[in-house]
């Protein structure tokens, strides 16, 4: 019995799977996820559409927290 319970404990030591990250724009699980410098995540397609929808002279800002986005990077998994 002791062995069984310690076996269960060791399984619980595994880090829990992260909650499926959802895109801050479409609210679906991120597809080709990108991360902004403010730490929010979006589908590459979503952020790309967003970037193209704003005037070139406007500051890009995060659609979630409205911090200026200086860069966004593709998260390779
Ligand atoms: Zn999306
Ligand atoms: Zn943000």
Image (cartoon, rainbow, N blue to C red):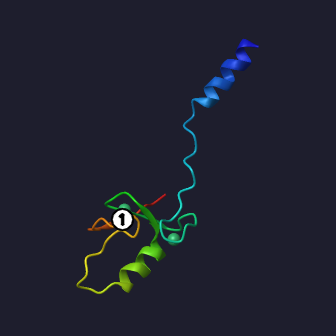
Q: Quadrant of residue 60?
A: bottom left
Point out the residue furthest to the front here: 65
In the rendered image, which quarter contains the N terminus? top right
Q: In the rendered view, would you say 66 is above or below 1?
A: below
Q: Position of residue 32 (x, y in %)?
A: 50, 68
- In the picture of the structure, the residue carrying the numbered disc 1 is 73
Point out the residue furthest to the right here: 1
Q: Report helix, strand or loop for mark 1.
A: strand
Count of marks overlaid on the render: 1
Q: Position of residue 6 (x, y in %)?
A: 66, 19
Q: Tell me: is circle 1 under 8 Å from ligand 2.
A: no
Q: Position of residue 50 (x, y in %)?
A: 41, 79
Q: Is residue 32 left or right of residue 11?
A: left
Image region (quadrant) for ligand 2? bottom left
Q: Is residue 32 left or right of residue 10?
A: left
Q: Quadrant of residue 54?
A: bottom left
Residue count near mark 1 (Cα–Cα under 10 Å), binned few <14, some 14–19, many ≥20: few
Q: Quadrant of residue 39?
A: bottom left
What's the residue at 57%, 40% (across, down)?
A: 16
Point out the residue furthest to the left here: 57
What's the residue at 47%, 75% (across, down)?
A: 46
What's the residue at 26%, 86% (across, down)?
A: 56
- Pick whichever, 71 or 67, lies toward us: 67
């Amino acid at each position: 019995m002791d062995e069984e319970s310690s076996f269960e404990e060791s399984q619980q030591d595994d880090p829990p799977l992260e909650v499926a990250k959802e895109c801050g724009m479409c609210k679906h699980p991120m597809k080709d996820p990108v991360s902004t410098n403010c730490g929010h995540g979006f589908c590459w397609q979503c952020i790309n559409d967003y970037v193209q929808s704003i005037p070139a002279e406007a500051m890009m800002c995060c659609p979630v927290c409205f911090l200026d986005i200086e860069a966004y990077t593709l998260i390779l998994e």
